[in-house]
Image (tube, grey):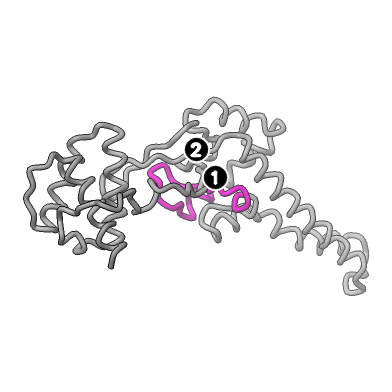
């Protein structure tokens, strides 16, 4: 499983799952079905409506006009829905910039323009090969626009929340941990778990100093034990309030 390292405002690397060919193809097929349905409806309306009862060229002109939204479907959806089409929404994937921040219209415009090379030339072989061979699973449009496709599926685990496993007889150490907010604790836990996993002791020490400064406490506990205790204490007091 490929992952993308993203640097947050807290200077912590977060891992996001990069999406390869399979899920992107399913999303593309869903969007294709939506477009085909729309185009079929428009064609039938023009054929059935007396308003467009004119010569063949006029009917084809109106049909081309009504097909325009379908032509710009991908670009419009990606801009309107924050890097997603309806197919991507269903598959729970989205387009983001390489640093993990939301895409801008110009990223999406470049990406959309290069669909001509990635998807429509040589039966999509260029796009397929670039995704398969790219380290970050990027098609040419992604590489040119500085974007990647990631999963936005939520992992419902205790480690992804501010909750901590504490025993009934747990004895808290720091009584003023409630000076922290839920948002503070979520950031602390996120940074703590990733830094501990990556043996990033520098970040752990900076995190410990920041918490100590906010809570105005001094402790003999080592960094990992200190932060772990703060997280457990916060859960103890907020669950018993």
Q: Are marks 2 and 1 in contact (CB under 8 Å)?
A: no
Q: Work out whether 166 lies above or below 199.
A: below
Is 83 or 1 nearer to us in this picture? 1
Which residue is depicted at the point 19% across and 35% down? 201
Q: Determine the CA span between mark 2 and mark 1.
A: 17 Å
Residue 71 falls left or right of residue 145: right
Secondary structure beneath label 1: helix
Q: Which residue is mark 1?
A: 111
Q: Residue 162 vs residue 122: left or right?
A: left
Q: Which residues are magenta?
A: 88-109
As drawn, the label of residue 18 is: 2
Q: Position of residue 57 (x, y in %)?
A: 88, 60
Q: Nearer the viewer, mark 2 or mark 1?
A: 2
Q: Is residue 143 above or below residue 82?
A: above
Extreme residue in the top direction: 133
State the image quarter where residue 228 is shown: top left
Q: Quadrant of residue 193?
A: top left
Task: Count the numbered circles shown.
Answer: 2
């Amino acid at each position: 499983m490929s992952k993308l390292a993203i640097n947050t405002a807290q200077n912590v690397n977060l891992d996001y799952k990069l999406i390869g060919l399979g899920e992107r193809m399913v999303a593309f097929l869903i969007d294709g079905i939506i477009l085909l349905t729309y185009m079929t409806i428009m064609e039938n309306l023009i054929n059935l409506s007396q308003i467009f009862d004119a010569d063949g060229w006029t009917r084809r002109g109106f049909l081309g006009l009504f097909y325009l939204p379908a032509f710009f479907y991908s670009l419009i959806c990606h801009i309107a829905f924050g890097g997603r089409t309806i197919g991507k929404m269903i598959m729970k994937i989205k387009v983001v910039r390489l640093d993990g921040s939301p895409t801008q219209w110009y990223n999406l415009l470049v990406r959309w323009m290069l669909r001509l090379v990635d998807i429509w030339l040589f039966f999509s072989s260029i796009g397929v090969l670039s995704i398969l061979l790219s380290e970050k699973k990027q098609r040419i449009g992604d590489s040119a626009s500085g974007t990647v496709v990631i999963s936005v599926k939520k992992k419902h685990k205790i480690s992804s929340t501010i909750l901590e496993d504490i025993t009934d007889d747990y004895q808290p150490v720091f009584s003023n941990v409630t000076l922290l907010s839920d948002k503070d604790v979520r950031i602390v836990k996120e940074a703590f778990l990733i830094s501990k996993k990556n043996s990033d002791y520098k970040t752990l020490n900076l995190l410990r100093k920041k918490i100590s400064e906010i809570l105005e406490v001094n402790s003999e506990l080592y960094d990992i034990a200190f932060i772990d205790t703060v997280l457990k204490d916060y859960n103890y007091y907020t669950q018993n309030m």
